Amino acid sequence: MTAQNLLVELFVEELPPKALKKLGDAFASVLADQLKAQGLAPDEAVVTAFASPRRLAAHVTGVLARAEDKAVSQKLMPVSVGLDASGQPTSALLKRLGALGADASAVAGLKRAPDGKAEALFYESVAPGVALAAGLQKALDEALAKLPIPKVMSYQLETDCELPGWTSVNFVRPAHGLVALHGSTVVPVKALGLTSGNTTHGHRFEAAVSPVVLKDADSYAVTLAGDGAVIASFAERKAEIARQLAAAAAKVGGGCKPIEDDALLDEVTALVERPNVLICEFEQQFLGVPQECLILTMKANQKYFPLLDAQGKLTNKFLVVSNISPTDASAVIGGNERVVRPRLADAKFFFDQDRKKTLASRVDGLGKVVYHNKLGTQGERTERVRAIARAIGQQLGGDVLAKSADTAAQLAKTDLLTDMVGEFPELQGIMGGYYARHDGLTEDIAFAIEDHYKPRFAGDELPRNLTGVVVALADKLETLVGMFGIGNLPTGDKDPFALRRHALGVVRMLIESRLALHFHALTRQVLAAFPPDLLQDKSVELDEFLIERLKGYLRETGFSGAEVDAAIYARQLGHWSSIPQRLAAVRAFAALPEAPALAAANKRIGNILKKSEGNVAATVNESALVEQAEKDLFAAMQATVPAANAQFDAGDYTASLQSLAALRAPVDAFFDGVMVNADDPALKANRLGLLRELHDAMNRVADLSRLAT
């Protein structure tokens, strides 16, 4: 059966730009998957998605006009149920055959085959392959039903019948055209009140012809580009915009580069059908406003690309991606420059007004801002964060760090009351840093205020100084303990308070900033900062939550689950800051030939000690050692463990574990020749004490039993 390429396009009004790429990919993938499932397209078919502001389309290679017939074997029933003692069909069998469109004449052709312990009857037939029109209709219906539409709208279509009337249609945007071409042949399908054809529409203003007639499926992109002035491919349009942005920046000169923002690039790609990048500028006076404010207003409100100089500083030039290409672009450039000016003037006004009040004068105002109905105001929260920051600062740097952390924590949230942050919430923290410098505060405090939300997302940088780390840690821990304490825990994929992100930030700061703090003690210290009886004590649950984030973080750095578990469940873990060194030691140890045997022995020792009654002390009476194997193990430990402990105390975890590898032979000999659970209680206790001492020594760096397979 001859295969040809298929093109399906749905022509609609302007689609939501932030959802366009996802809509285009989903439409093409579901359509193709459904065609493959029906045998109309091969598994290796190439699927190309197209998505522009006014169209979703898919091109699928190697589609058949009719799927191949397929042999079908259907189990009917056990032979004992379908045939009587004389081999004649029972009424149950005849009824089942009738339901399949067969009669008694089909009994002779039934196949017998084992089915478990019994023998069953199978009816073999040939299912005719589905025709493309029917199969595509099903695939198209499924593709539209499964579109990840952010918000559905309803619109009316005039009923196509003799009686006048209207029918309601629900879709993301009103649809006005449907194309379905198998090669050059129109496939008759319907969707959203539309019937398929071979015509579409190009650019609203610059199409050479309207409608655009498509010769065949393969000429879709070329015809739209030529006759319709539309780059149909989202990826090609995005690449073209990126190319034009770079070319325009080079034209400006001075090492200028457009700001890198892939989300903005995607959104602009979804707003234009044939991009044309233009260079615009604004007055130099606006550069006195913090560049974050100007960049944000240009990106968020106008979808412009600000230009940065070679040092990363904002220039007064910006790039506009226009959807039209007039011979004289001066009117378009002038219009965009007029539009951006009031936005920048607003930012300058906010900045000037905000600096008329100090951050310190805004502190009392936080008491009027509700943080959470169960956790009080921002003012109350600020006092809790201050207390936590002072305690952490005292532990890490004494009075000096405690004082600077307290000051930064007191002022960290005050920029929430400024006009600039009221207009642009994304600038919270950043504006606090600018206003702190204006108030004459030190760079240390300004950086801490600016950075205390960091890390904001996976891969974000940590606060730049220790004061900032302390305040950020206090802020995130206060949120975690508070939300856990009132029962606002993440469930499934729902995490409205971003507690997973906060927990990952805590993990990263404890490890990457090498803080000498124990997470277990931290969560209880934070709980004490809240008023009594305000929260439930969820410290254990929060500890487990943090450990899960820790495991995920470490696995993402390239370590296996077994290596991670071995490192974090070490007997003497202490501060998480030592975990990276422990992981390196575990990996080096695992590569040793002695590692599997020692890991298995460690696991065995752990099980023996768990089953023993009471706590086993790590004490050994050398004179009570009887068997040669236990004497040899004790001697080997006396020669090896002190050196391994000294290396551990010096922080050389790799050397410590490698020193213990020398114990493999005596450990193997011990288990081969010594009965631990001896009948003599004193002898048994002494042997358990020997194993306890060995177990403690082996698990200081890592829980080696986790490496056992």
Image: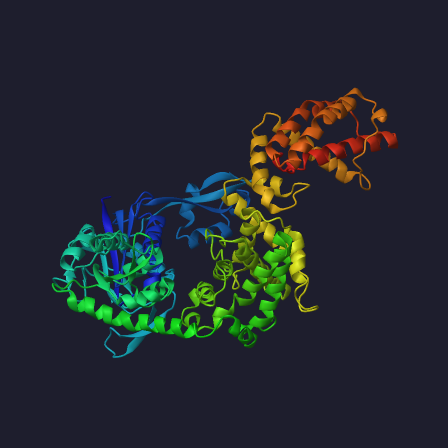
**Quadrant of the rendering where the C terminus is positioned:** top right
Position of 110 compared to 394: left or right? Answer: left
Residue 225 lies, in percent from the top left, at: 17, 56
Which sits in the foreground, 216 or 627?
A: 627
Q: Residue furthest bottom?
A: 164
Which sits in the foreground, 149 or 371?
A: 371
Residue 299 lies, in percent from the top left, at: 33, 63
Name the image quarter holding residue 202.
bottom left
Residue 340 lies, in percent from the top left, at: 28, 69
Residue 11 seen in the figure:
yes
**Quadrant of the rendering where the N terminus is positioned:** top left
Q: Is residue 483 above or below residue 670?
A: below
The residue sitting at 83% across, 33% down in the picture is 685
Q: Is residue 158 above or below residue 662?
A: below
Residue 705 seen in the figure:
no
- Marker count (numbered): 0
Name the image quarter holding residue 50.
bottom left
Residue 426 lies, in percent from the top left, at: 43, 65
Tell me the colour scheme of the image: rainbow
Which sits in the foreground, 281 or 3?
A: 281
Q: Is residue 162 above or below residue 70?
A: below
Name the image quarter holding residue 614.
top right
Q: Residue furthest front?
A: 440
The residue sitting at 76% across, 37% down in the picture is 609
